[in-house]
Amino acid sequence: MPWPSANWPKPSRERPVPDNVDELMSVVRFFLFSLLSLLVCCPVAAVTAPEPHGRTPSKLHLRFTDDLEYHLLHKAIQESLHYLRQRPPATKFPLGPSSCTANDLIRSLVFFDHLIKSRPSPKLLTLEITTFFDIYPAAGTPTIAPPGTVLVTGYYQPVFAGSLVRKAPFLYPLYAIPGNLVLRRNHVTASVQPGRFRGGRFVPYWTRKEIENRGVAKGSELVWLKDPFDAYLLHIQGSGLIRLRDGTLKGIHYAMKNGRPYRSIGKYMVQTGKITLQEAGIDTIRRYLNEHPEELHQILNTNQSFIFFQWATDHDAIGNLGRPLTGGRSIAVDQRCFPAGGIAFLQSRRPAIGQKDKKQWIALNRFVLAQDTGSAIRGPGRVDLFWGTGRQAGQAAGKMKESGKLYFLLLKKKFL
């Protein structure tokens, strides 16, 4: 799969973030504003971007604008900074075939946060970003044309009714980590593999079907829901809010998985002709399962992966960085390809839900932060945008299955 070349700017040695960023920015902005006044009639800035192996650098004609509130961007940046500042400064993060350090990412985020303080116009912001930042386009997925195109999907934090005791209609449990699940560390990859012991041997943990049918996690139930598809949906989203029978609202988060491979039931239903690719989405899947209850468990069990949960201390959705996600700003990506906590620019389109605009789809152009990952998010061609909490967020997330472009930003070497 093509990736930007090894000629990308290399990470520099760690240096502290300067205290006079505001003073520096005021001087730089004066210079850029003067330059911009000479370029008012010029086309959008062209950015020289690193290209995949064997290609000469080309021009990316980008106009940086943002369709969401900047205060949410500031909040998301602070969450990334909180995570990165807990890492040793020299910690390396992947950026294509190269890497950057935690310190590089921190300096880039602090600088960018200062850029947006004055809410610059798109023209000025474009000039500032192309002056100070290197821009790294995601390689995309080879199954979508043109090259460099990513598949953008959505996820959200659902709110479901639940009960702490099993009593009709609350019959479908979410489980905590069961006592018979054990973890084995792979010292080569530093990864952790869930499993169990059988006859003194470490073997894979049970599949979704086995957990559901054989009661192997019995006694680990956290809460019961009304609908088996609601429970399944929480497995996919990773977190949610449970409204208990007394009206109390409690957060529930991902704790561990069984280690079995993830398989999309939506893709399975398309492949078997149950639904079409064009109509595939949460609402369509739910409707089909409601109309064909005899197929429900067989369809859900095609996905062997199973999630275990824990209660949260608050109502925030938490990403894999251990920090709260920001609706519309946080994305899940493959962090073997992209830097955790890094900032990027996302271009796609979004459903016009809750908008007065009668158009079904409108352009999506915004800055986002890589603050989560997921079982289905693999490779440089996948982006999952977090939409927030509740019904409207779920409607938007369920419709997102769009092509797009993703560009990561990192301060140029001379400014690090």
Image (cartoon, rainbow, N blue to C red):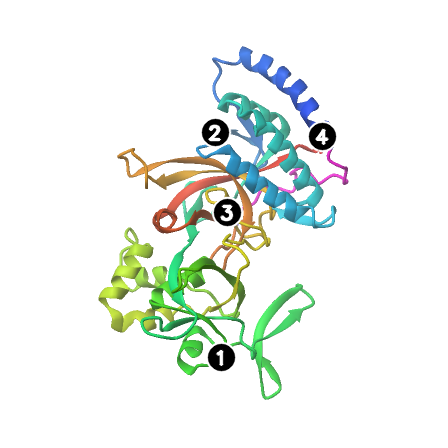
Q: Secondary structure of the magenta portion, mostly? A: loop
Residue at 63% x, 73% y is 184
Quarter location, residue 269: bottom left
Callouts 3 and 1 close, C-beta under 8 Å: no
Which corner quadrant holds the C terminus?
top right
The x and y percentages for residue 69 are 47, 34
Q: Say which residue label 2 marks.
A: 65
Badge 3 or badge 4: first in the primary sequence: 3
| Distance (Cα) linking label 2 and label 3 | 18 Å
Q: Is residue 275 above or below residue 115?
A: below
Badge 4 marks a residue whose secondary structure is helix
What span is in magenta? 2-17
Badge 3 marks a residue whose secondary structure is strand
Q: Is residue 234 above or below residue 80?
A: below
| Distance (Cα) linking label 4 and label 2 | 25 Å
Residue type at tag 3: Ile
Residue at 44% x, 81% y is 215
Residue 244 seen from this side? yes
Judged from this view, the residue extending furthest toward the bottom is 199
